[in-house]
Amino acid sequence: MQEYQQIAAWVKEQHAEDYLLTWLLTQPQLWWCEGELYQAAISKDGERLKAFVETHQESELLVQIADKLTEDDTWEIVAVFLNQICDFYQELLAKLPEVRPKRERIPRRGLESQNFAIEAWAREESDADRHSDSDAIA
């Protein structure tokens, strides 16, 4: 029990924002457009995010972490990061239909061939991004 308390104290002191962000990502309300958390993330509203956490605190550690984050700027930063994660997730979902046709062209021999198709698509995307970055620099 004492080891748990030491870890909890370390998390609160060193990684409060990280823990909070990770907890927020596991909340179902983040993934529903009418959810309070989703609206806070989309609007990058730290105050709204703080209100959500205060009403949905499930553990003593989360209560202590929320109490530690006293500055509004900190809540705003967490809200901005949460927004960026949601944006990136949306981008990946938008690219998912592009993966399907490429995956279907490769003969399926089980999970290994599916992984190969996804990795090949990711390499193509990475190469295209590098080329567009170098074109923008030139």
Image: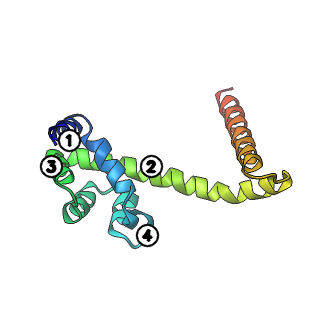
- Residue at image position (15%, 49%) is 64
Q: Earlier in the sequence, mark 3 or mark 4?
A: 4
- Element on which disc 4 rests: loop
Nearest the viewer among 105 and 91 is 105
- Element on which disc 1 rests: helix
Residue underneath mark 3: 64
Give the quadrant of residue 104.
bottom right
The alpha-carbon separation of the residues under discs 3 and 2 comes to: 25 Å
Q: Earlier in the sequence, mark 1 or mark 4?
A: 1
Residue underneath mark 1: 4
Nearest the viewer among 41 and 17 is 17
- Residue at image position (40%, 73%) is 34
Mark 3 residue crowding within 10 angstroms, few (<14) / some (14–19) / many (20+): some
Q: Nearer the viewer, mark 2 or mark 1?
A: 1
The reply to whether the C-beta atoms of the residues labelled 3 and 2 are less than 8 Å apart is no
The alpha-carbon separation of the residues under discs 1 and 3 comes to: 14 Å
Q: Nearer the viewer, mark 4 or mark 2?
A: 4
The reply to whether the C-beta atoms of the residues labelled 2 and 1 are less than 8 Å apart is no
Is 135 positioned to the left or the right of 101 in the image?
left
Q: Amino acid at mark 4?
A: Trp
Residue underneath mark 4: 32
- Colouring scheme, one of rainbow, by chain, secondary structure, one colour: rainbow
Q: Is residue 8 above or below residue 48?
A: above
Mark 1 residue crowding within 10 angstroms, few (<14) / some (14–19) / many (20+): few
Nearest the viewer among 60 and 50 is 60
Quadrant placement of the N terminus: top left
- Element on which disc 2 rests: helix
Residue underneath mark 2: 84
- Which x, y percent locates residue 101? 79, 58
